[in-house]
Amino acid sequence: MIRKKWWYLILVIPLLPWLIRSANFFYPRYSEFSDLTITHLPNAIYLVNSIKNFGVLPLWSELIFGGYPFAANPLSGLWYPPGWLAYIFPQPLGFNLGVIIHLFWGAIGFKRFLDNLGLRSQASLLGVFGFLLMPKLFAHYAAGHITMVYAVCWTPWLLFNQAANQRISRPVVSAAILGLIALADVRWLAYALLLWGGFVIFEQKPLFKPIPLLIKIKHIAEIPIVLVGAILLAAVILLPLAEFTRHSTRIFMDLRDLAVNSLPVEELLGLWIPDFGGYAEWTLYPGATIFCLGIYCLSLPNLRQKNIFWSMVVIFSLLLAVGDALPFFSILSRLPVLDLLRVPTRFYFMGGIAFPILGACGLNDLLQREQLFRPDPVFFMTPFVAFTGFFGLGFLVLGERLPANLIWGFVIFLVVIFLIAVLERNRRYVEVGGWMFVLLLFLDLTIVNYQSIRVISAEKVFGENRQTVDYLKSQTGDFRVYTPSYSIPQHIAALSGIKMVNGIDPLILRAYQEFFIKASGVPLESYSVTLPPFPTNDPERDNQKFTPDLELMSLLGVRFIVSEFDIAPLQPHQVTQFSESRVYENPYFSGMAWVERENRKYPVEFKQIQPNKIEFKANGPGKLFLSRIDYPGWMVFIDDQPTTFGKIYNMFPVLDLPDGFHEIRLEFKPVPVYLGASISAIAWLGVILFLLLKRFNDKN
């Protein structure tokens, strides 16, 4: 027991450099943006403030897009309890601790899975470090894909449970893990199901080895049972998400949208040449040690047959990652669930998990092999290091400076291949050599990860465009802001309580997008996660040719427009400027709700504005216009009586207000959320009771 605890403490060592600097933000080396500050941090701020200020879980958010169903957004962080730990601490410390804890938890699961295979300690630790320090995982961490990292880190436990648990509780635990994966990041659920389903069928048996039919049926029958269980456990997000998706622009994605960021074929070089600061979606490097030992594993017939499933996972994940370059990708992209997934390169996360398993099995065989196998496995590794060498020679011939990643890749590959050759021929150094492999992998991946990430202080990130933000905060009343140049980052807006009509999120309501295009004047040619779109990813210049329609913007409750570029037609309405940020005031702004009578607009008196409820007073008669996005679940009450309402632009609620003063209340009560929460609560209670009873019976 003591030895196991010591092993787990060793797994903390690779995380120490990140833990030490966890009070800072980690960004991609060559990017100004991170999904942490764009999405996860604003959502966390909004969630915590809603609980702190109003004592309610927010089901609706006014942060971006003029409002959207927060409870249905899989990136809201609302339904994943382990992720709540991040909200206890100041940011970014909270999210960094959350990621580090998940990485550590995933590493423990990976080690238990490898130990279950009966591997030697050095081989097991090598595989664990290969997962724990996976460059693709850290590249996505830096890119701010926090929930994706959370979900991936549960996958080793899914594999371990399938491999080690032969009891009746195995399907229940598998369903629980898949349910947690869905709650953490529903996008990873599809990939995790593919990996787990394949593992269930193969169970590490050689592909062509006869297996009794009853055993096959038993294994395959687990898949639908576990899938149904996972769906019930995650119903709290799946049901609202299904409705949100139906009303969103997501269903209009075509093949080009689904294949966005497909892996260019030339990026396959990244398997053995590390890319310092490369694009997260195209990161492939598993580490020279893992790569070479993976080749070792595949070059020996008996070892290759034993690990054919993991070999197939690596190969198929790479094939699927190239996306639309595959002839059958168009067919694959039409399959249910997969037709909603973008970015094919994320299939390679499965390969990123399989590669360390192959490397660990390769090292285990190398450390215990009694005689040298012919042909020598080193023979199959030399072409890769030779290619890297000739590639570098080409730079020298052309008089170019050798890239640091090319030098490092060449050197570390030479060292690893040399060490493999030595251990093949001299068995006296097996024990020391095994630990040297672990040390080399640790050094290699730590350097690659550090070279791919830049550290930014919290003060700098939270200090963006402070003067403009302070000016907007000083303005009284309830209003929204439009910035065609992303002048107010979403985390700053959330921190300052600024509501925006633009924004960035994978899910956008169709009706809202259609209206926004007219109001902003910015055309949209294809699916976009941003409103307004930024065709060249340069927010400060992309939309300077377009002028917003101020009257339509007033319907969205826009009082101020903030832009990094000059909008000539709005010059008469410019009220101030801070550095390059110009602030324009909308002369048509009439508030967030008003009564229209005899072609005049009369503002209403807001009494209370909460995430799920709004109360105000209005004087009739007239047409009451609400600058709120209508969505299933919103209910309107006049003097405590429910009332029906019409819509204009297929989006804004409008109702007839009788004569006299009236109390109006809007409440958001989405049926899918309440139904999903009830189903999930019952399902989780059932799982907990089942496992407790199982444990009680085992003890007796």
Image (cartoon, rainbow, N blue to C red):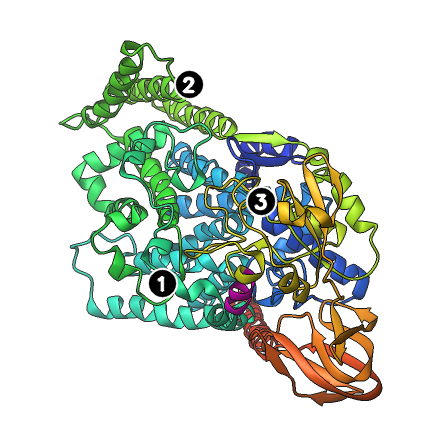
Instruction: Kindly identify which residue carries mark 1.
Output: 339
Q: Nearer the viewer, residue 590 or 650?
A: 590
Compared with 388, 666 (above or below) is: below
Q: Give the magenta part as a residue range.
A: 509-516
Residue at the image position 56 percent from the left and 44 percent from the top:
544
The answer to whether the residues at label 2 and label 1 have Cβ atoms under 8 Å apart is: no
Image quadrant in which you'd find residue 46? bottom right
The tag on residue 404 is 2
Q: Nearer the viewer, residue 338 or 384?
A: 338
Circle nearer the viewer, 2 or 1: 1
Specify whether 568 is left or right of 167: right
Q: Position of residue 181 (x, y in %)?
A: 49, 58
Instruction: Kindly identify which residue carries mark 3.
Output: 99
Residue at the image position 47 percent from the left and 30 percent from the top:
277
Q: Nearer the viewer, residue 686 or 494?
A: 494
Circle nearer the viewer, 3 or 1: 1
Q: Position of residue 339 (x, y in %)?
A: 36, 63
Quadrant of the frame with the N terminus:
top right
Task: Answer whether residue 511 is magenta in the image.
Answer: yes
Residue at the image position 42 percent from the left and 53 percent from the top:
160
Mark 3 and mark 1: Cα distance apart in space:
29 Å
Mark 2 and mark 1: Cα distance apart in space:
39 Å
SS class of the residue under badge 1? helix
The answer to whether the residues at label 2 and label 3 have Cβ atoms under 8 Å apart is: no
Q: Position of residue 161 (x, y in %)?
A: 43, 57
What amino acid is found at the position of numbered circle 2 in the picture? Ala
Disc 2 crowd, CA 10 A, few/some/many (<14, 14-19, 20+): few
What amino acid is found at the position of numbered circle 3 in the picture? Val
What amino acid is found at the position of numbered circle 1 in the picture? Asp
Mark 2 and mark 3: Cα distance apart in space:
28 Å
